[in-house]
Image (cartoon, rainbow, N blue to C red):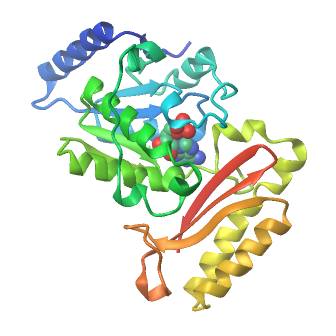
Amino acid sequence: MARQPRVVRTLPALHRALARLRQAQQTHQAHPTIALVPTMGALHQGHLSLVQLARQHARSVIVSIFVNPAQFAPTEDLASYPRDLDADLAALAGSGVDLAWVPATETMYPPGFATRIVPGGPASVGLEDKFRPHFFAGVATVVAKLFLQCRPDIGIFGEKDYQQLKVVTSLASDLDLPIKILGAPIVRESDGLAMSSRNAYLSAGERTAAPTLHRVLMDSADKIARGAELVRVIEHGRAAIERAGFVLDYLEARNADTLRPVGSAQDGPIRLLVAARLGRTRLIDNVAV
Ligand code: AMP
């Protein structure tokens, strides 16, 4: 059977394991490199592609698995979020991950915990932040903690959560963290639906409608690239998403770097970003133009 990663659950165990990793690396190479792939578990091929990228850039790979309460609003799906550590460890078997960092909630947020990192810039552009006002403070705080706990040289994040990737990149830069942030392309099902742990919530009917999001993104990107008027393309795309049965949070064309609104294709590079709800499941996706 392929080897599963070593699981560490407490900070002292993590520090011992990290010291061993660094020592083992030092005997071979001058500078140890460690990559961290933060996840909330319910691992799928998207997560595994991040692990692969991590392995290309670093000699040791840590995957953290932690469903972070601080990034869920009371109305969101914290209680029902899929959790299956055994399945996650089986998914990671043979993938070359050295450590699975699986802290308890009390380890991350012990009694008396009172510090929050509140990001600005790409975290306040009226996309995810508008619909999930506490989300990025929760993400920034937990990512900063994970970085300080694991001290990786590289942090790997998926473009699936494009705004999050920008927020984490700016967090690392603003706080002078000596960590290089790498983004990984979105891994999709064969019908285009972006892989997500939340896809498991979709009913059969919803699953059939779900790839509409990607279809509309691709169609809109194609039209914009061929010179169609931005406002009209977006209006058309919004209507198509709603016709497929979604409740739309947003479909927006934004500057791919700053995530600020763009007036025309000349303000590019452009990224199209969407968030929409199908029943009780909220899906997000994005594509480059
Ligand atoms: P999550 O477990 O949903 O918090 O995701 C952990 C990391 O995996 C984040 O950096 C996500 O952007 C990334 N990720 C999730 N789904 C995908 C996907 N389909 N393709 C690429 N990366 C993904």
Q: Reply above or below: 73 against 252.
A: above
On screen, residue 284 above or below 31: below
The x and y percentages for residue 153 are 23, 36
Q: Position of residue 168 (x, y in %)?
A: 36, 47
Asked if residue 96 shows in the view, the reply is no
* Residue 212 is at least partly visible in this image: yes
Quadrant position of the N terminus in the picture = top right
How many numbered marks appear?
A: 0
Percent from the top left, x then y, of residue 215? 72, 67
Q: Quadrant of residue 202?
A: top right
* Relative to 221, 271 lies left or right: left
163 or 125: nearer the eye?
Answer: 125
* Farthest-out residue, left: 30
Q: Is residue 263 above or below residue 196?
A: below
Residue lying at 13% horizontally and 28% vertically, measured from the top left: 29
Nearer to us in this view, 90 or 216: 216
Residue 54: % across, % down: 37, 38
Depth check, front residue: 36 or 162: 162
Q: Is residue 96 left or right of residue 161?
A: left
Residue drawn at 51 percent across, 63 percent down: 126
Q: Is residue 219 left or right of residue 166?
A: right
